[in-house]
Image (spheres, grey):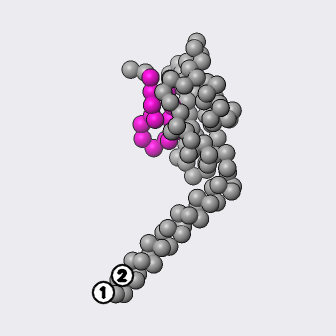
Amino acid sequence: MKKVAIVIGCLVLAGVGAVAAVDGYLKWQDPVGYRNLKTCSTIKPGASLAELKAVLGEPVDQSTFRGATWLHFQTASIAAGPIRAAVQESTGNVVTLRCNEDGPDTWSLKD
């Protein structure tokens, strides 16, 4: 029984060490993308384009999908996809924010 506890303890310790190493590597290798992943969820619904850029910096790409203009922001390389925001051109307000490609939008003002 003691051997099993020691093996489990070693595996947990190795897992914690691996997570800490990856976190440290991302902070060092891609500080902007890492920061954007951490701060994206702090953006409130209905934010303006200026507020969005103040938090995430300038967009690195732009696309159009179903009539909406999507801005793409720098994201850490381990993310499933870039941070994206749909902007209503007439008002300059963000109508949808997607901080993570895994799952639903972070928030959306659309019905």
Residue 29: percent from left, percent from top: 69, 55
9 over 85 or under it: above or below? below
Judge by depth and name the residue closer to the eye, 42 or 72.
42
Secondary structure type for disc 1: loop
Residue 85: percent from left, percent from top: 55, 30
Secondary structure type for disc 2: helix
- Amino acid at the residue labelled 1: Met
Residue at image position (50%, 41%) is 100
Label 1 Cα crowd, 10 Å radius (few <14 / some 14-19 / many 20+) = few
Judge by depth and name the residue closer to the eye, 69 or 4.
4
Judge by depth and name the residue closer to the eye, 42 or 11.
42
Residue at image position (30%, 86%) is 1
Labels 1 & 2 near each other (Cβ < 8 A): yes
- Amino acid at the residue labelled 2: Ala
**Residue range corresponding to the magenta coloring:** 96-109
Residue 72: percent from left, percent from top: 61, 34
Q: Which mark is residue 27?
A: none
The residue where tag 2 is placed is 5
Q: Quadrant of residue 73?
A: top right
Residue 61: percent from left, percent from top: 66, 33
The residue where tag 1 is placed is 1
Query: Is residue 66 toward the left or the right of residue 77 in the image?
Result: left
86 over 103 or under it: above or below? above
Gap in angstroms between the C-alphas marked 1 and 2? 6 Å
Q: Quadrant of residue 18?
A: bottom right
